[in-house]
């Protein structure tokens, strides 16, 4: 399992990639999940409350020789990790 994690306005945004799929977890709650294997994946979520409430989260996973993760909040790149 590979994990990417960023803090944004006091919120914990976590992306997990496993052999059988991936998950977007915001503040401890799963907001999107991909099932199965693929070379690319996109997941979506939203900050539900507090500072940043209503802001959209988009996660892009993919790569040729490994998996890279890019986290966008309201269409701006917030976290990029390999």
Image (cartoon, helix red, strand yellow):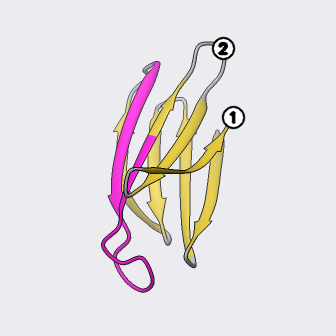
Looking at the rendered structure, the secondary structure element under dot 1 is loop
Work out whether 12 lies above or below 5: below
Q: In the current view of this chain or complex, which residue is farthest to the left?
A: 54
Q: Which residue is mark 1?
A: 82
Q: Which residues are magenta?
A: 39-59
Q: Is residue 40 magenta?
A: yes
Tell me which residue sits at (37%, 36%) in the image: 42
Give the number of the disc on residue 67: none
Q: Residue at x 38, y 50 (%)?
A: 75
- Neighbor class of circle 2 (other Cα within 10 Å; few <14, some 14-19, many 20+) is few
Q: Residue at x 38, y 70 (%)?
A: 47
* Mark 2 secondary-structure assignment: loop
Q: CA distance from mark 2 to mark 1?
A: 11 Å
- Badge 1: few (under 14), some or many (20 or more) residues near its Cα, within 10 Å? few
Q: Do the residues bearing badges 2 and 1 touch, measured as CB atoms within 8 Å?
A: no
Q: Which residue is mark 2?
A: 65
When asked about the image quadrant of residue 46, the answer is bottom left
Q: Is residue 66 above or below residue 18?
A: above
Residue 17 relative to residue 57: left or right:
right
Quarter the N terminus occupies: top right
């Amino acid at each position: 399992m590979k994990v990417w994690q960023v803090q944004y306005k006091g919120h914990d945004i976590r992306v997990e990639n496993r052999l059988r799929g991936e998950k977007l977890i915001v503040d401890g709650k799963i907001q999107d999940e991909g099932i199965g294997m693929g070379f690319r994946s996109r997941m979506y979520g939203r900050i539900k409350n507090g500072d940043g409430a209503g802001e959209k989260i988009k996660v892009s996973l993919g790569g040729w020789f490994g998996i890279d993760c890019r986290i966008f909040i309201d269409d701006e790149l917030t976290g990029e990790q390999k």
